[in-house]
Image (cartoon, rainbow, N blue to C red):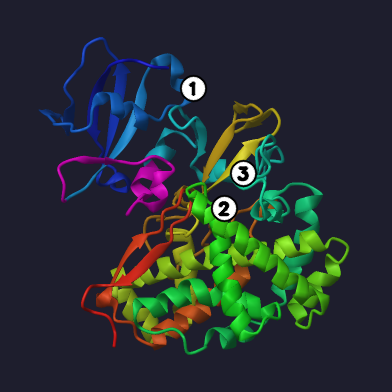
Amino acid sequence: MSFARWALAVEALTSAMLANSVLVRAWPSINEQSIRVRAGSAMAAATWDTPISECSAFIFRSRTNQAMYQLEIVATLSPSRTRQRFMDPITAATHPDPYPYYASLRALGGLTFDAHLTLWIASSAEAVCAVLRHPDCHVRPAHEPVPKAIADGPAGRVFGRLMRMNEGERQHCPRSVIAPALQDIDPQQVETLVRAPVITEAAEGLHHGQFVGPTSVIATLLGFSPTQSRLVSALTGDFVACLSPLSQATQLQVAHRATERLEALFRERIEAPHTPLLASICRGLATDPDSLIANLIGLLSQTFEATAGLIGNTLLALIRDPALRRAVMADPKRISLLLAEVQRFDPGVQNTRRFVAAPCEILGTTLNPGEVILVLLASANHDPRLNSQPDDFLLDRPNRRSFSFGTGRHECPGQTLALSIAHATLQAMLEREPRWDRLTWSYRPSINGRIPMFSDRPGTQAP
């Protein structure tokens, strides 16, 4: 549907869940209309510094409302600015506060169609659960099992064998071996590995704990020496660039080279596995060494992303709430509750995608092969039908439920390990008493991840 002009009305929303948001209703019009803001029963003129032609880029429409010719968009108002800031379901991942916006999407319906992005949006807990558990909703499109940008290189070769990027036996077989092996890891061993003297109060030390430390722990558990583990961690950081469509050509070239080095390192390692974790995985996948190596690299890359977001967003929660910080530092046993609530309240993975492989029906909506569903995990976590008082941060939340690690056949097999690494890392960080007032941050560019990157404020670097 395309119209040259729109008649727009901006309505202030009174729900506490939608604070700082407005709902914009738009109708096709032959005459441009001034935008008006309703505050209660009053109507007042409002300025709009975005051309109306651009506004249509932010329209969200349910197919069931097509006949009404009524479209809706949501703008978030910045208290310190007069202009409106728009977001869509993708850019929301790195927005300072996407949760009121997610609530507005749930209000439009659990499964709706975004005309601009040409995606279905699953925003409610019911819709997210239904999509993730549906056998015809796959992790990759049938016509492009490996992204074109990396298909012809080493990174594409590994990507195509990752269990998280496959269905059927190519997903089930490696998972059935790796998942139980991860469950057997001793949390005490993880804590010992994390407690190397590398985490400092400065941002550089926090960066190490957030990104380098977790993958180094996994590398050590897989039999690499401390020096090799740091190299493996750095190479993993280079490899994960191939997983993002935002990566530039130079980053993809680096990812290909990193993949080749990781493959070579693992070929040496699997010839004589001498740690319980690696030996267990090698026994189960001995007949397919290529799949074995690819999924060992996948284990590193998934740890890199999952723990970086979890640790980073937990640090943000502590920075923003001094009372919470004091409570946790006074009783370190509450770190586990803190991590559990952070991964529900502000998860490092905000969304994932599913691709419709066959005609199917979800929540009364017919979906066709080739259609794409953006699954808003973070929105589902804030659905009041999943968690009571979902927008409150509660350490002692009863019956906490979350989709942050997925559900169904692709639920993350390393959830327990990720939480264990994050717990040991946070405990080590808190013992060093970071100078919270020295830190600033911004979110790493991503279409689905919410990973804060910390830096020291100018002039405040620790000696």
Amino acid at circle 2: Leu
What are the residue bounds of the magenta stretch? 80-103
Near-viewer residue (232 or 417): 232
Picture coordinates of residue 178 (x, y %)? 74, 66
Name which of mark 2 and mark 3 comes first in the sequence. 3
Determine which residue is flagged by label 2: 243
Q: Quadrant of the C terminus?
A: bottom left
Q: Name the residue that disc number 3 marks.
A: 147
Decide if residue 202 is in sight here: yes
Identify which residue, 113 or 18, lies in the foreground. 113
Amino acid on which disc 3 is placed: Pro
Residue occupying image coordinates x 28% and y 30%: 24
Q: Earlier in the sequence, mark 1 or mark 3?
A: 1
Numbered label attached to residue 332: none
Q: Is residue 82 magenta?
A: yes
Which type of secondary structure does the marked residue at label 3 adopt?
loop
Tell me which residue sits at (18%, 25%) in the image. Answer: 35
The mark that comes first in sequence, 2 or 1, is 1
- Which is closer to the viewer, label 2 or label 1? 2
Q: Dot 2 surroundings within 10 Å: few (below 14), some, or many (20 or more)?
A: some
User: Label 2 vs label 3: CA separation?
Assistant: 9 Å
